[in-house]
Amino acid sequence: MRNSTFGLTAAALAPISAKKDGVFPQKESKPDLLSVGIAGYTFHHLDIDQSIVIMQQVGVSALSIKDFHLPLNSSQSTIDEVKRRFNSAGISIYAAGVIYMRNETEADQAFSYAKKLGVNLIIGSPAYDLLPYAEKKVREENIRIAIHNHGPEDKLYPGPKDIYDRINKMDSRMGICLDIGHALRAGADPARSVSDFSSRIFDLHIKDLADNSSSDKAVPLGRGIIDIPSLVKALQQIQFKGRCSIEFEQEVKDPLPGIAESTGFFRGVMSALS
Amino acid sequence: MRNSTFGLTAAALAPISAKKDGVFPQKESKPDLLSVGIAGYTFHHLDIDQSIVIMQQVGVSALSIKDFHLPLNSSQSTIDEVKRRFNSAGISIYAAGVIYMRNETEADQAFSYAKKLGVNLIIGSPAYDLLPYAEKKVREENIRIAIHNHGPEDKLYPGPKDIYDRINKMDSRMGICLDIGHALRAGADPARSVSDFSSRIFDLHIKDLADNSSSDKAVPLGRGIIDIPSLVKALQQIQFKGRCSIEFEQEVKDPLPGIAESTGFFRGVMSALS
């Protein structure tokens, strides 16, 4: 190996069923620990096989799928095939999103997609005037929606309070996907947001930022300004049962090291606080 | 990138001075946090440039150098050149080892090497009958030696007590490099060992094991059976001022993900307990 290239290539291209280099056993999670997932946007430059290799290497088995891996207008058979590929690699798809919904047609498509996919959680961003229709769909389909906050540039939902204030009188299956990086940039403390909006926190996008000037400042968890231990304590306090999905969105040739470091950091915090 | 290979290759081969992909800023360490390093054996299949890339990617700047990167009989100019390469990449060499010493010639060479390298710590494994000579060298050169425990297969120093019992009446600069994986396999609890032998713990090799049956069972930190939070608490309790060096020795094509996950986990534990 000293004289050869090194990197992920061989592992990434290996068939899923082959014994995989760099895949280590993951111990059974203790019941009191939070559940870790990966937010699909993390893999925005990777195909499904590459994403699977990375998830296996970091030992995370739950994915919130993003539409570049499975378009929203996919047929049932395409959806089944993509599900099969993830499932046969030991990965379950627990949610889909972020899905933008600007009109009823898009909302119908989102709920139809989630239903075909067999998930009971959509990470979404519905237009304000579509919220009553989204609530109707939630009731009809018994599929929850977690609205995603996208920071100061988001005209609809910069921070979690912008979501909470619009949904807290609506069906209890309408909630929040707390993106802690965008929340911080919108002036909201992530841990405090978990406590304040506890009944409506359904999902999280976990990340860190070198500073709060822009979303381009993503760094591996623990290197930046977000207080992850306080977040974990707040989640433990509310006995959070959803997923804490790592979202590592930085533009790098190989996102695996940053995903691995972030996942390790989050697990280390949980381990120390359990 | 979707249609190209992905991996470390380009980054690994890039000149050190180039802007490096996947290198993120590391925040200033808080004074009360333990210091993280890397044990050189981690890089046993990588050359110096590849090792530097990995250390920069995981944001660790202290290395205990192993002789495959710098042979023990190197000239002063070779040593200076290797030091320059690491230093110009922001990495300091804080120790050298593990160095085996079976006779006075080997001990002389080890201390001469450390002196030329400008480090005041040798991670070593001296034969029993060489301990008085090693102590003499420690006094002459004012260079400390941390004896490394290597598990049940090690005829000299399986666990930390085997070291402590032989050095605790010797010069206070004779100590232990606590290898927590090998210690566990030798029946010693790592955290308890830190407390029991606190005055003589100079350095650590931090790792995890899927089980304690063999040293081949290395896994990224947090995936195995070693209680890292208890170890960190014990180190904080004794106000440990040395280095906690990650040693990820598993045979994989690309060790970076395991190193990154391990480093992240250790930092996460420290962060939660600080």
Image (cartoon, coloured by chain):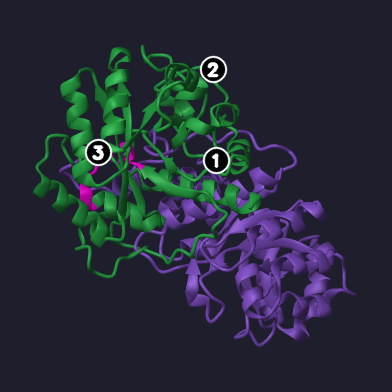
Chain colours: A purple, B green
Q: Amino acid under label 3?
A: His
Label 1 marks a residue whose chain is: A
Q: Is residue A263 left or right of residue B82?
A: right
Extent of the magenta region: B39-49
Label 3 SS: loop
Q: Is residue B56 magenta?
A: no
Instruction: Report the disc number at residue B187.
Output: 2
Q: At 21% from the left edge and 62% from the top edge, which residue is drawn?
A: B14
Q: Amino acid under label 2?
A: Gly
Label 2 marks a residue whose chain is: B
Q: Are marks 2 and 1 on the same chain?
A: no
Question: Within 10 Å of the Cα at label 2, are there few (<14), some (14-19), or many (20+) other Cα atoms?
Answer: some
Q: Foreground: A85 or A94? A: A94
Instruction: Report the disc number at residue B45.
Output: 3
Q: CA distance from mark 2 to mark 3?
A: 29 Å
Q: Which residue is mark 1?
A: A90
Q: Amino acid under label 1?
A: Gly
Q: Which part of the image, by quadrant, shows the C terminus of chain A?
A: top right
Residue at the right extreme?
A169
Q: Foreground: B57 or B38? A: B38
Q: Is residue B261 left or right of residue A6?
A: right
Front: mark 2 or 1:
2
Looking at marks 2 and 3 on the same chain, the residue that comes earlier in the sequence is marked by: 3
Rendering coords of residue A9 (x, y %): 30, 49
Label 1 SS: loop
Q: CA distance from mark 2 to mark 1?
A: 34 Å
Q: CA distance from mark 1 to mark 3?
A: 30 Å
